[in-house]
Image: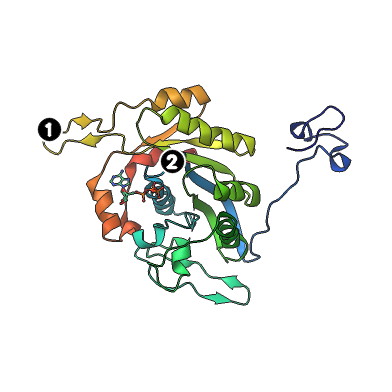
Amino acid sequence: MAEQQNGCSPSDCAGCAHADSCGSKPQDMKEPANPFSHINKVIAVVSGKGGVGKSMVTASLARMMRQQGFSVGILDADITGPSIPKMYGLHEKAKGSEQGIFPCEAKDGTRIMSVNLLLENESDPVIWRGPVIAGVVTQFWTDVMWGELDYLFVDMPPGTGDVPLTVFQSLPVDGIVIVTSPQDLVQMIVEKAYHMAEKMNIPVLGIVENYSYLVCPDCGKKISVFGESHIEEVAAGLGIPVLGKMPVDAGLAELVEEERFYEADNRYLEDAVNKI
Ligand SMILES: Nc1ncnc2c1ncn2[C@@H]1O[C@H](COP(=O)(O)OP(=O)(O)OP(=O)(O)O)[C@@H](O)[C@H]1O
């Protein structure tokens, strides 16, 4: 917690004539991007808990922006459970030069960096302690030559541990998207993610609900497989928009299994395009 002086707090610094010399000013721990990276917007995709389809949502948002003609990258910060390269059929090793590491390029032009593109065998487990993992994620920012990007999506590990903290402190994150699924604990889980972003002064762009429903292939009826959704109330309570609701979609799952996500055409998140 930053020390308070003169009875003021870090949030009072903006516009204060004494901000530069005052101990209340929050320390800027942002790391410089690689000199060969020019990134317009960094968006972190987070979830309060695992298994809600965060990577699916990250890649879907990236695909949608790609379809709109934007240049897009995905930084896979889920170091112990990386799934992005496989979704896009990438199994090569990333190459480097004196200036840094090149991201790998998927068939739709999405630039991707993940620990799996650096490991000798992609099935090798990553058994590193939190600070080492957080250091690798920072290097994906400082050492990777992303080039010109309109959007860099960061697929975060679940929860509020070391890596999310490092990403929020070290990368200039413009906003976060919270992914959740319909369940009783949703309010508490979303609020945890929301308050973490708030404490780090990062705007929450909205919530995506995954596994929202299933459409019966015979009668077309929507079935709430994981219970009724309360996402609208939770979002309204926090004053943030619902960016979209994704059903369990066998077509999307198939594209993941067949490692052809670069062909995905996910219309469920269409509303998100103008909000992120
Ligand atoms: N809406 C969906 N419809 C069909 N399959 C889905 C959907 N969302 C996710 N999946 C599938 O569920 C599996 C898990 O998804 P994903 O890897 O995105 O989860 P995750 O939240 O990133 O996992 P974790 O955070 O626990 O590492 C994947 O095989 C993915 O293809």
Which mark is first along the chain, 2 or 1? 2
* Whether residue 198 is situated above or below residue 236 in the rendered picture: below
Which residue is situated farthest in the left direction here?
A: 218
Label 1 packing within 10 angstroms: few (<14), some (14-19), many (20+): few
Residue positioned 47% across, 54% down in the render: 78
Spatial CA distance of label 1 from label 2 is 33 Å
Q: Mark 1 points at which residue?
A: 219
* Residue 227 drawn at (x, y percent): 29, 28
Left or right: residue 159 compared with residue 16: left
- Residue 216 occupies quadrant: top left
* Whether residue 183 is situated above or below residue 123 in the rendered picture: above
* Residue 217 drawn at (x, y percent): 14, 39
Q: Nearer the viewer, residue 244 or 23?
A: 23
Three-letter residue code for mark 1: Cys
Label 2 packing within 10 angstroms: few (<14), some (14-19), many (20+): some
Residue positioned 81% across, 33% down in the render: 4
Left or right: residue 273 compared with residue 196: left
SS at mark 1 in the image: loop
The reply to whether the residue tagged 2 has its Cβ within 8 angstroms of ligand 1 is yes
Left or right: residue 29 compared with residue 155: right
Q: Name the residue under label 2.
A: 49
Q: Which of 242 and 190 is in front in this view?
A: 190
Q: Nearer the viewer, residue 276 or 74?
A: 74
Residue 247 visible to the viewer: yes
* Whether residue 77 is situated above or below residue 89 in the rendered picture: above
SS at mark 2 in the image: loop
Image quarter where the N terminus lies is top right
Residue positioned 88% across, 42% down in the render: 21
